[in-house]
Image (tube, helix red, strand yellow):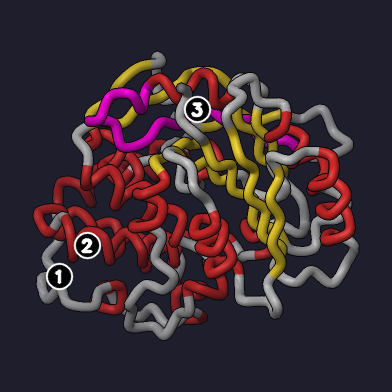
Amino acid sequence: MDKLVSILIPVYNREDLIEETVQSARNQTYENIEIIIVDNKSTDNTWSVLERLAKEDSRIKIFQNETNIGPVRNWKRCIDEASGEYGKILWSDDLIAPEFLEKTIPFLANHDVGFVFTSTEVFMNGTTKRIQFHDIGESGFYHSEKYIDGALFKNNYPVSPGCALFRLKDLQYNLLINIPNKVHSDFSVHAIGNDLLIFLLTAHSYSTFAFVNENLSFFRAHEGSITTQSQDGKLILYYNLVSAYFVEHYRPTLIKKMNAKLWYLLKISKIDARRYNFDKVEDFYVINKDYNVDIWFLLKKILSTVLHKLGI
């Protein structure tokens, strides 16, 4: 029998978007699914929409928190209410193609594979503009070190699990509500970086990940999203704070390379860094005491910036 997949939809105040999101889950060609939706005590008509949808489809299981418990704790409740072998986080403003599960699940039959993600299309309502992300090459299996290096030091690797499929047990274990830090940042509230850490911790535990080179996940850009509401400088700083946490606790051999990246980040974003209490490289770490930098990595990063500005 096909293994049960839990599609996890945390939601807050999405009365105009949630039905389309849920419909994309209902439309999956892979049939053995449950759709777990937890409403974080919305103040609009989201709950009424969910009640109607749940009456239409027995696969939809809806829950509502008594009070707003913050975004990350709401993600966690979605996971805790699920009973599938696999877990697919679907943000309440995003969509997945009907074939998403059908084309990703086979990769997880290999027990060395920690997760599988697809290329992603970002769209905005009312426009024809589409931007593609996360195209890392041909569909297939890749070594987990490629994801870790790419997510920490390069671009075009996903930080949002909205484009990925995991084993439910790994989501349960690797979603951290809060992340220890020196700058008094409450990750349970701003939810910037908890998503990346799911990927990094899972990649650390498996030798392989998989990629499907098809646009099967669709991210909606709009004013109400966490990414849009957060200033670019804040996003970059907090994602690097999470990256530094991962490196110092799980990959200390990458400390000098991470230090070089952080040193460069502080130089090019001084105003934002001071706003969020980052004055020096040490502020990104909890236990690390080695602040030496990888000079060659730093020089390559500076050269890359110069060439980009020159249009070369």
User: Which residue bears the numbered disc 1?
Assistant: 291
Residues in magenta, as a range: 107-123
Magenta segment includes 262: no
What residue is disc 2 on?
Answer: 259
Give the percent coordinates (x, y) of residue 290.
10, 71
Q: Is residue 110 magenta?
A: yes
Q: Closer to us: mark 3 or mark 2?
A: 3
Quadrant of the image containing the C terminus: top left
Query: Which sits earlier in the primary sequence, circle 3 or circle 2?
Result: 3
Disc tally is 3
Disc 3 marks a residue whose amino acid type is: Thr
Residue 130: % across, % down: 71, 29
The amino acid at mark 1 is Tyr
The answer to whether residue 125 is above or below residue 169 is: above
- The residue identified by callout 3 is 118
- Judged left or right of residue 196, residue 99 is right
